[in-house]
């Protein structure tokens, strides 16, 4: 597989090992490795980070490797955003996988073909490998276009990442934000939700680069390729997942993409896909939100019962 790949890892040796083993099938020829430093106030984390790096230092296929291992912890936003810039300065375009993502082998061909197809289309900012659905999207082609960005396995170009604005200007400037609400969000529930999200990011309650990149796409009137079926699986739905633990119970498997691809007729945002992301994933419609809350309550009750059983067994 000729497309360069950036692997972003941190402190989860089990996830790292699973991902490395899965990548043997496609054996990318060029691999960039990014690993943040351990947090000084987390006991045992330095050992976990060291274990992750030992796995990454022994990739089980022949490839060219470049490494950026942080000596100190930079956090998700700074580490990942700077790391993606480092990666794309070298290779112009590539595939990006964080440590909790396992990709079906067909995802890499899917990404390669679409990176080439839309290389000269400045309105396309990224190619996502995940749509957060257990069932296929009801679209006629093998992928569609959305205003929404998914980072659970994705690909992009340097020309798109060069637009990245970490300052949240699209939200801070109220005239620009009103235009985004009118053009992209189109509803008070969504506008209120995303205003709250970006306020959380500004106040450093969410250490996220992905929300900042999403806002950049909205501000620049860009779009994102979304697959009809998931081509990646997120395995980070547990207590160790800094950004994904609260999604526990929403796991979806990866499927294999058939080729040749069936392409959409136009590069045009599909309202059906946008509706799914907003109502099903982000601000959530009332039925979806009630289902989400019920799932959270069940998960909390299950965790409490499990804790009580473990405690009783130790008495």
Image (cartoon, rainbow, N blue to C red):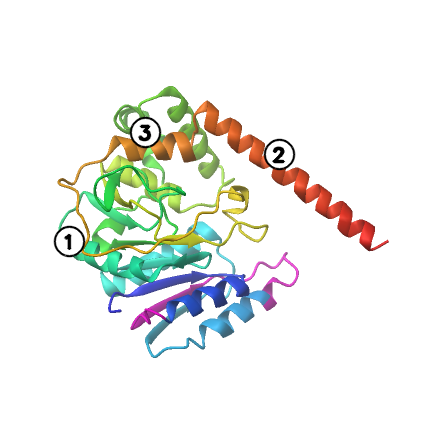
Q: Does 64 appear above or below 136?
A: below
Which residue has dot 2 on it?
297
Q: Tell me which numbered mark, 2 or 3, is placed earlier along the sequence.
A: 3
Q: Residue at x 38, y 54 (%)?
A: 232
Image check: 260 left or right of 41?
left
Q: Element type at marker 1?
A: helix
Work out how far the residue at label 2 is from the one at label 1, CA to CA, in angstroms. 45 Å
Q: Residue at x 64, y 63 (%)?
A: 44
The residue range painted magenta reads 25-47
- Where on the picture, by quarter, is residue 256? bottom left
Circles 2, 1 touching at the beta carbon (< 8 Å): no
Residue sticking out furthest to the right: 315
Q: Does 277 appear above or below 234?
A: above
Q: Badge 2: few (under 14), some or many (20 or more) residues near its Cα, within 10 Å?
A: few
The percent coordinates of residue 43 (x first, y second) are 66, 60
Nearer to the camera, 165 or 194: 194
- Mark 2 or 3: in front is 2
Work out how far the residue at label 2 is from the one at label 3, CA to CA, in angstroms. 38 Å
The percent coordinates of residue 15 (x first, y second) are 50, 62
Q: Does 155 appear above or below 53?
A: above
Work out how far the residue at label 3 is from the one at label 1, CA to CA, in angstroms. 34 Å
Q: Does 19 appear above or below 171?
A: below
Which residue has dot 1 on it?
117
- Mark 2 or 1: in front is 2
Which residue has dot 3 on it?
173
The percent coordinates of residue 211 (x first, y second) are 39, 41
Q: Tell me which numbered mark, 2 or 1, is placed earlier along the sequence.
A: 1
Visible in this render: residue 236? yes
Visible in this render: residue 166? no
Chief secondary structure of the magenta portion: loop
């Amino acid at each position: 597989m000729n497309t360069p790949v950036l692997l972003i890892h941190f402190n989860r040796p089990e996830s790292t090992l699973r991902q490395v083993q899965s990548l043997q099938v496609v054996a990318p020829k060029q691999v960039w490795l990014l690993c943040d430093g351990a947090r000084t106030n987390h006991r045992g984390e330095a050992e976990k980070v060291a274990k992750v790096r030992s796995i990454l230092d022994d990739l089980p296929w022949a490839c060219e490797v470049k490494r950026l291992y942080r000596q100190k912890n930079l956090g998700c936003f700074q580490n990942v955003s700077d790391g993606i810039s480092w990666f794309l300065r070298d290779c112009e375009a590539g595939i990006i996988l964080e440590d909790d993502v396992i990709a079906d082998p067909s995802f890499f061909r899917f990404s390669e073909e679409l990176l080439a197809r839309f290389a000269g289309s400045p309105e396309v900012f990224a190619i996502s490998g995940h749509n957060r659905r257990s069932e296929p999207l009801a679209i006629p082609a093998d992928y569609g276009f959305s205003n929404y960005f998914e980072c659970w396995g994705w690909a992009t170009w340097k020309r798109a990442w060069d637009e990245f604005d970490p300052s949240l200007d699209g939200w801070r400037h109220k005239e620009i934000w009103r235009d985004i609400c009118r053009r992209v969000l189109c509803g008070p529930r969504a506008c209120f939700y995303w205003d709250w999200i970006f306020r959380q990011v500004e106040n450093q309650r969410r250490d996220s680069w992905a929300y900042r990149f999403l806002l950049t796409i909205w501000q620049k009137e860009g779009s994102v390729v979304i697959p009809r079926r998931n081509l990646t699986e997120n395995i980070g739905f547990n207590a160790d997942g800094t950004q994904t633990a609260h999604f526990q119970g929403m796991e979806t498997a990866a499927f294999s993409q058939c080729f040749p691809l069936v392409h959409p007729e136009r590069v045009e945002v599909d309202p059906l896909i946008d509706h799914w992301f907003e109502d099903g994933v982000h601000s959530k419609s009332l039925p979806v939100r009630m289902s989400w809350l019920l799932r959270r309550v069940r998960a909390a009750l299950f965790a409490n019962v499990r804790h009580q059983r473990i405690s009783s067994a130790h008495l």
